[in-house]
Amino acid sequence: MALVVVVGGAWFGYRQLAQPGCSGQVELTVAVAPEIAPAVQAAAGRWAAGGPAAGGACVTVEVSAQEPVEVAAAVAGGHGVTLPGVGQASGTAITPDVWVPDSSTWLVRIRNSGATAFAPTNGASIARSPVVVAMPEPVAARLGWPQQKLTWADLLRQMNTDTKLRTGIVEPTRDAAGLAGLLALSAAAGASGGDSQQAKTAALRALATGRSALRQDLLARFPRSSDPAALAAALGAAALSEEDVIAYNRTEPPVPLAALYLEPAPMPLDYPYAVLPGIEPAKATAAEALFGALTAPTFRDGLVGQALRGPDGIGGAGFQPPAGAPAGSVTPSGNGGRAAGGPDPSAVDAAVSGWSIATQPGRMLCVIDVSGSMKQPVPTAGNATRAQVTVAAALRGMDLVDDSWAVGLWTFSTEMVGRRDYRELLPIGPLSTQRSQLKAALGGIRPTPDGDTGLYDTVLAAYRRVQGDWEPGRVNSLVLFTDGKNEDADGISQRELLAELARIADPERPVQVVIIGIGGDVSRTELEAITKVTGGGVFVTEDPNRIGEIFLRAVALRPNAPR
C-alpha cells in the first residue's frame, strides 16, 4: 500500500511538473464511430499523457464510442431539424464537442435538412474504409471473383434478373455504407439507358425486401453452412464496408465473405473529424491539437487492428486487405454520388428521399393549386407552365410509389364547385387499382383563367378528409402545391383555420401536412403557421423547375407510421 501511495504521488507530481503552468480545466468530449473508437482512444490517451493545455487550462479528453445515427439525431435535434428515416434522438445520445462519424454524408444530411447554422470546422478524414459488396465466397466465385472485375451495372442486372440472388442492405437512412451502396446503384440505374427510373425503382424494392435495421442483424443472415440449400436460402449480397468484411472473417465463420470492389468505386467511409459549432475557443484549440495526434504516422498503424486504412486509402504496417482488393490506394476519383471535395448533397438528398418513398407504406391526398397564376411560364423548364411542371413532378413521384400506397387527388382555386374552393378528381384509394386513373387525372389538370387561391378552406377540408379515413400502419399525409397566398375573401380566416386545426388534431391519428410553395408570391410564414399546428413541413422554391426534387424531399419528410 505504501508503494502504491509513493508511485501514485510521484505520477501526480510528474503530471503537475510536466504540464505547463495552467489554471482551470478544459474537458473535451469526442464521440466516434464504434469501429474506430479503440484507435482514437489509444491515440488520445497518449496525447493526454503529455499534459496538453489550451487557453491556459489543462485539457482532459473523454472519447466515447457512439453510433453515428444516434449522434446525428441528437445534433440535428439541437438545430431544430429531423433527418428522414432517423427520427428523434434517444435518451442516451449526446452532442459532443468533436464528432468522428463513419461518413461525411451525416454532415451533409444535417446541413441539407435545413440546419443552416450547422457549420462544423475541420472535417478532414482521419481514416478510410472502402464500401464493397459482401458476398459469400462460393456465390462470389460463380461471378468470377477474385479475378474478374465487376461493375455496379453488372450487379444491377443480376438483381433485376437473377431470382436466386438474395440481396440485402442496412437501412440506408441510418447506415452510411448502405447509403453509399444505394448511391452507387442509383447512379448505375441512371446510366443504364431505357427506363432508368423503372430499373432504379425495381432495385430499391428488391433491396427493401432484404433490409435490416442493424448491421449485426444483416451480417447474421449470411450463410452458416456451405451446404447448397443453406447458400440458396441465405443472404447473397449486401453493401458493407471493407472493415465489416475483415472483422466478420476474423471470427472464422463457416462461410467467409468475399469483398467485391465494384466499379465505379463508390463513396467510402471517410471518418471526418468534425469540430461542432458553438464550442468555446479553448475547446476549439484543444480539438485542433488532438487532431494533430490523430494524423501522426503512428495513428495509421494503430488503425490496422481495427481493419481500417489511413485517410489516403493506404493501410498501415501489416494491413492485409481482402482478396481482390485493388493495389495501393482505394480512394475514388469522383463518381457513384461523390463529387470533388466530398459527397454530392443533391445526390445524397435524392437517394434518401427516393428510398423513403419507395419503401415506406403511405396514404396521401395530393392537392394541386389551379389558380390563374399557375399558368405562368417557367423559363428554366422550356416555358412550360407552373401547372405543367407541378404535374410532371407528381407523375415522377408516383412512379416511385408502389402499389401498397393509397393516393387521392384534388385541385383547388376559388369557387370550383359552386362556392366550394376545391374539386375531388380521385378519392384516396389503393394504387393497385387506380394508378392509371390517377395518371389520367393528373394529365388532365388545367389552371382556371380567373381563379384565385382558396387556400384556407381547402387545407381544412383536405385535412378533415385524410383524418376521417385515417388508417393505422401507414403514414397519413396531405401534400399541397401552391404558388400564392390565401385570396378567398369569402372563406375562413387564418385565425379560424389554425384554431380549428388545433381543435381537431388528434395525436393518436396524426396527419402529416406538407406544403410546397412555388415562386416568389408564396408566404412561407403563412404556410409554416399551418404546419406548426399539424406537423409536417414547408418547402418553398423560387424556381418551379426544382419542384421535382423538392416533391421527393417533401414526401420523404414523414414520421414513422403509428402502430
Image (cartoon, grey):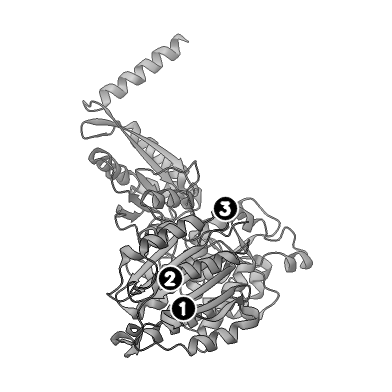
Q: Disc 2 to disc 3, how far (Cα)?
A: 59 Å
Estimate the x, y position of residue 457 in percent, counting from the top left.
43, 70
Rendered position, 500 above or below 396: above
Rendered position, 418 above or below 79: below
- Select label 2 or label 3 by which is in front: 2
**Residue 414 located left or right of residue 443:** left
**Residue 196 located left or right of residue 234:** left
N-terminal of the pair, mark 2 or mark 1, is 1
SS of the residue at dot 1?
Answer: strand
Q: Which residue is mark 3?
A: 247
Estimate the x, y position of residue 485 in percent, counting from the top left.
32, 72
Q: Which residue is mark 2?
A: 457
| Quadrant hosting residue 289 | top left
Estimate the x, y position of residue 334 in percent, counting from the top left.
38, 72
Q: Disc 2 to disc 1, how far (Cα)?
A: 8 Å
Rendered position, 526 above or below 41: below
| Quadrant hosting residue 3 | top left
- Select label 1 or label 3 by which is in front: 1
Which residue type carries mark 2?
Asp
Marks 2 and 3 in Cβ contact (< 8 Å): no
Q: Is residue 353 visible?
A: no
Q: What residue do we see at 49% from left, 70% from top? A: 461
Residue at the top extreme of this rendering = 2
Seen from the viewer's position, the closer of residues 427 and 206 is: 427
Q: Residues within 10 Å of mark 2 (few under 14, many from 20)?
A: many
Q: Which mark is residue 422?
A: 1
